[in-house]
Structures are given as C-alpha cells and as structure tokens.
Amino acid sequence: MEQFQLQGKAVRRAGGTRRQALTGVNASGNLEILVERVLADHECMVEVTTAVAGFRGTWDAVAQDFFTRASPGGLRFSINDGGARPDTVMLRLLQSVRLMEREP
Amino acid sequence: MRSGKFCVGSEKPDRRSRYRSTRDDTQSGAREEGGTNRDPAPFSGPSLIMNGWNRQKQDRDARLGAAATSASRKIVAADQAKALLEAVIRPGDRVCLEGDNQKQADFLAECLAAVDPQRIHDLHIVQSGLVLQAHIDLFEKGIARKLDFSYSGPQGAAIARALTGGRIELGAIHTYIELFARYFVDLTPHVALIAAVEADHAGNLYTGPNTEDTPTIVEATAFKSGIVIAQVNRIVDTLPRVDIPGDRVDFVIQVDRPFYVEPLFTRDPAAITETQILMAMMAIKGIYAEYGVTRLNHGIGFPTAAIELLLPTYGETLGLKGRIATHWALNPHPTLIPAIESGWVQQVHCFGSEVGMDNYMSARPDVFFTGHDGTLRSNRLLCQTAGLYACDMFIGSTLQVDLMGNSSTVTTGRIAGFGGAPNMGSDARGRRHPSPAWLKAGREAVDEPTTLTRGRKLVVQILETFGDKMTPNFVETLDAVAMAKDLHFELAPVMIYGDDVTHIVTEEGIANLLLCRGPGEREQAIRGVAGYTEVGRGRDPVAAEDLRRRGIIRRPEDLGIDLLAVSRQLLAARSIEDLARWSGGLYRPPSRFRNW
C-alpha cells in the first residue's frame, strides 16, 4: 500500500454547502472517493491510498489538472483507488465536486 | 492505303516477335507442354495454344478421378474425409479453409491437419481467418507453408511465433474484402473446404444465418475449375432454402457435430464502465447528432456497445430518434436489441450471424435481411461493400494510436490481423453519391469549400487513454513498426491510416482531425485528448487550449454533458439477461454469457 497527499491551490471556494459526499463503489473496480469540506477556502487536497505503486507522477498530474479545472477550494478528497486508471479518477473527482455543489 | 500500310508495317515486327517467342519457349521450357518442336508462329498457332486452354479442367477431372477411389458419389462418409482430401489436394495448391471471425469449417480443418505431410505439403492457405489450433497445426507440420489471410484473433501470438520460427511464409495481411477480391485475380483457390448447415442429396447447400464468406469462396473456386468440399450438420431431402447451388459443390460430408461459430459480437452490458458511457455520450452528441449520421457501422468494442445501449435513453432525451443511426451494416449485436425494440433502427445488413440471435432476427424481418424460409441471410463480401460505399461513418476501438492518428491492433508478440475494420474505416475514394453527413465532413476538411469539394467518410476511433494494466493506448511509435522491421515485412500492419481518421474520442474529449491544418495541429489535437499518457502529458497546453477554442478539441463540458448524468443507469440494458428480456425471450444467449 502506498499513501500520499497531493496539495493544491484553488482560485475560489467550491460551491454549495454540503459538508461531505461519497461517490463510487469501493472494491468494484469502481473508484471510491470521500469528499469533506474541511480546508480553508483556497486550499484543496487529494489523499491517495493505492495498491499500485509507481504512478505518483501520474497521480500528481491528475490532481493538479483537477484543481485547475474544478477549483475545489476548501475540499479534501480521500481516494481509495481499487486500481483505477487516471480517466476514472478524474471522472470521479469531477463528479464528487458536482455532488458537493448540490443541496444535501 | 491504310490497310496496305498496316500490312507492310506489321511484317517486320512479326518476324522479330516470332524469333523472340521461339527463344523464350526454349528458355522457359515448361511453359508449353510438348509443343516446342513446332514453330510457334503467333498468327498460326491456335492448335498449339488451344492445347493449353483447358488444362485446369483436365486437372480437375484428374483430381476427381483420384477421388473416385475414396468417393463414388457426391456424399462422402466422415471417416473418408481425410482420404478424400489426400486424393484431391496436390502439393503447392492454394487452399481456402472456410473460417472467419465467426463460422468455422472446423471438421475439415482438423482433417486437413491430419493428412500425410509426405503426400500433401507446401500448401498456400488463402483464407479469411486463421483462428483454430488446426490452422496453426497445418504450418507446424509442414502441410502448409504460405499464408495470405485477414484475421487471426485468438491465434495472434501463435502466428507471430510461427513467423519468427520461419514456419509461415507470409504473403500479406488483408482486409476481408481485399482478400476476397484477390480470390478472383491472383489468389484463386484450387480447393475450397466450406461449412453449411444442411445439404440435400444433389449437393445444394443451406448455410443458415451464417452464410458469411461461403458464396464468395464457392464462386471463386467452382467457376475456375477448382474443387469444393462442404461439411454439413445434416443431409436432408428438402432444404429450407438454397444458398449454394449443388452444381458448384463436388463433395458433401455430414459431420456429427455442428460447425463451430464464435459469439464474437456479444458484449456483456455488465462490463461497460462509466468512462465508456461518458465516451459514448460524447460521440452521440458531438458526432452522431452533429453530422446527422444515419448510415453506419460499429466495431465490436465496449464503447460502441455503450452507444448502442444509450440510443433509446440518452439519444431519446436529445430528440435524436429517426435522425441518427437508422441504417446499419452490422453484425447482429445483441446490444442493438433495445434500440431496435424502441423503433430506432430501420434496417440492418449483416456480415454474419451471432450465436443466440437467430430466432430474434427471424421475428424481425422488417429490420433484417431474411430468406423466404424466414432465417437471416448474411454475406460478408456484400456487407463489407455496404460498409465501404453506403455508410457515412465507421466507429470502432483500437489498441494503439500514434501522433498522426495511425492505429494498430498489433502489439508486441501478437498479430491479430485486420478483419473488416480497415475497409470500413477508410474513405471510399470511388464514392459518388452525396449525403448530408458525408458532405459536411468533406467541407470541414478543406479551407474554402468549392463546387468540386468532395465528401468524406467519418472514420472515428473511440478508445480509452489507458488499456489493461495501465498500458498507454497513445504512443509515439506503433508496436507494428518494430514488428514489421523484426519480421522483414514490407508493410507495417496499420489498421487504419491517420489520413483516413476524422475523429478520435477518448474520455478526455473529441479531437476533430478534419479541422486540423497541418501535421503540427494534428499532433496537438491528438495529444490534447490523450489524457495522462506520456503522449498526452507531452502536449503544448497553450496550443491545446487554442484548438479547444476553435472547436477542434471538445471536452464533455464543451458539449454540455453533465458528468453527474454519466451513470450505468443510462444503459438501456445492464446485463445479458436484460437484453434477453428486451427481446421478449427471442434472444437466446450462449451459456457462457448466462448467469441466471
């Protein structure tokens, strides 16, 4: 198991008021992400737990792109990757931000 | 005056040619059997030439005579099959063992692999698919040496090994229609070994829904003095319909097991991922709707299966019913059932059949081509022709795409062949009929449309940026290039050439290559949808954003696709069982796809 944190800056605070959300189904080849609104307005972070070592650079690129694309200020994302590929990770991250924007 | 001139002028060359012709005969010797004593004057030599005009018929008669010892009639017992093959096949013959990506003359393949290699050797195999173990055995045992084929699928690795080991001398890897064409020019079979469902006592054949390659193979062989041998599941008094007339069939062998058919086009909806659904939504909205594509062909991958299953749901919400995907050149994909049942599909012509779909198609003759007996009639050559000339779009998956958009399914150590994709996935330069989709694509490909602007077929590659085990699907150089070098191929096996590809769809977006001007833009457009592969991360972000502003790259958000809507709930069927239910129980999935 490899575990690491990827920090980023966001231009603005993520929309909505929801405190937390969960997407995906773990252990189904379908990435699971827990989102919590616990950081300062311009901070964001992705915390990764992965069984597949050696893709730190790819994860970093995915996370930085995601921060730029979605501007998820204030959100911390905990990923239990289940061996997911970058495309699934990005899709789930973007979906989880959209979930946080919705009314609870 | 004119004729006089002609006579005078023709005398000298005449003498020269006579001299040359004599010398040539002496040198080549074997060309004219036993005729070298006589002066072969070109204008007075019909008697000599005619000697050689029916040699193929004589050869055929000799083979049939040799077969008479093992087969006194058209119907041959299964235990005499090997003896029959040894009697009618000669070393060095071109042999077509019917088999493609679906049906297989598997019994005859096993018989041929069991003949005595001392008697029959160095055969030149000219067939669509090299997919059975017996096909490989032919080369391992030295029964066959040369190979011209189209598709190998499961035997891709074995073929690569046999090539490396020097046991296969490869002619070329073809697309189906291209190999069929060569049957009539320079690869005409001496012997064809085919498969049918039923025969009558006169040798008429009923191929059932899996007609596929049979008429083409028989046409080329029977009308060029070749010998046609059919394996059949049953011999009956009266056939449901005649697919092959009996006077084109020399021998019929009843085999106690049905010929094998591979359910290659069955995709289990349960295995479709949300990434594939996202790609499917982008394709429907960004390409099908945009160009108004009504006539098309789909590949066999999961992303296109997802598209089929999204038509009655997502497509319906976009109001596209009747405006896209109405006429198809397509195998009977089970995943098309919901779209058919929802009234989306007007017509489907099939290359072959698909295991379990026969009853369903018989019950939908308004959609499928069926005989008066009620069962499907498929035909690979004609359907490939339909895919080439009468479809406005081909969309399919691939395993590798390079920076210019060339694609290949060859990966290190595997030669999977082409099948039909390069044919349908190419612009038909001989096409002359217009359609809105074709004209729009053609206009996009040039800067200033003129009155002579020609159309373009839409050739779409739809693929995820990464494959299994995080293998990048986008690469700087195709594996096919290295393989061609290792095996000394004159031609690297490219599935679809970049200059035919008009769009690439990945989970990151759509790249419209028609709108690109120059190789630089093209490369950045491809990198711009290549995700987190090295190719994707090597993009120039400024150039990619510029291409996006110009609509050459389009992201899901540019297409107005809500990512939260991307869900398996959108699939009209989420399991094989759902498909069977949609069909009202008419679709009978093969057991390997049943889990209920």
Image: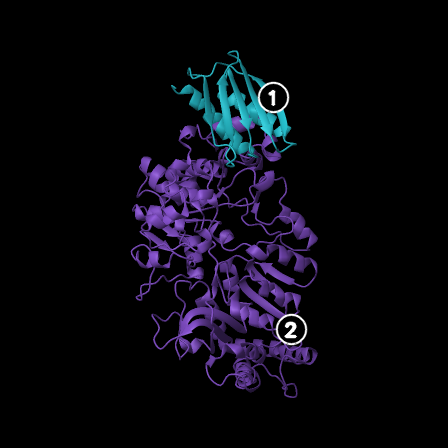
**Colour that chain A carries in the picture:** cyan
Does the rendering let one see residue A47? Answer: yes
Q: Is residue B402 visible?
A: no
Q: Name the one closer to the observer, A70 or B334.
A: B334
Looking at the image, do the residues carrying marks 1 and 2 touch, with CB atoms under 8 Å apart?
Answer: no
Q: Is residue B220 left or right of residue B365?
A: right
Return the residue nearer the eye: B334 or B540.
B334
Instruction: Please determine whether, in this image, residue B591 is positioned above or below residue A64.
Output: below
Q: Secondary structure at mark 1?
A: strand
Disc on res. B116: none
Which residue does the numbered mark 1 point to in the structure image?
Answer: A5
Q: Is residue B358 left or right of residue A48?
A: left
Instruction: Kindly identify the amino acid type of the residue bearing the numbered disc 1.
Output: Gln
Local crowd size for mark 1, using a 10 Å CA cut-off: few (<14), some (14–19), many (≥20): some
Residue B423, image x and y in percent?
49, 53
**What is the distance, in whole Å, between disc 1 and disc 2 at their CAs?**
65 Å
Q: Is residue B469 above or below residue B13?
A: above
Q: Is circle 1 on the same chain as circle 2?
A: no
Colour mapping used in the image: by chain
Number of callouts in the render?
Answer: 2
Look at 44% across and 44% down and name the residue there: B304
Query: Residue B136: x and y, percent?
Result: 61, 63
Of discs 1 and 2, which sits in the foreground? 1
Residue at the far bottom: name it: B37
**Percent x, y of residue B446:** 47, 39
Could you tell me which residue is drawn at 39 percent across and 65 percent down?
B208
Chain B: what color?
Answer: purple
Which residue is disc 2 drawn over?
B121
* Residue under the point 63% across and 61% down: B170
Q: Position of residue B487 (x, y in %)?
A: 68, 55
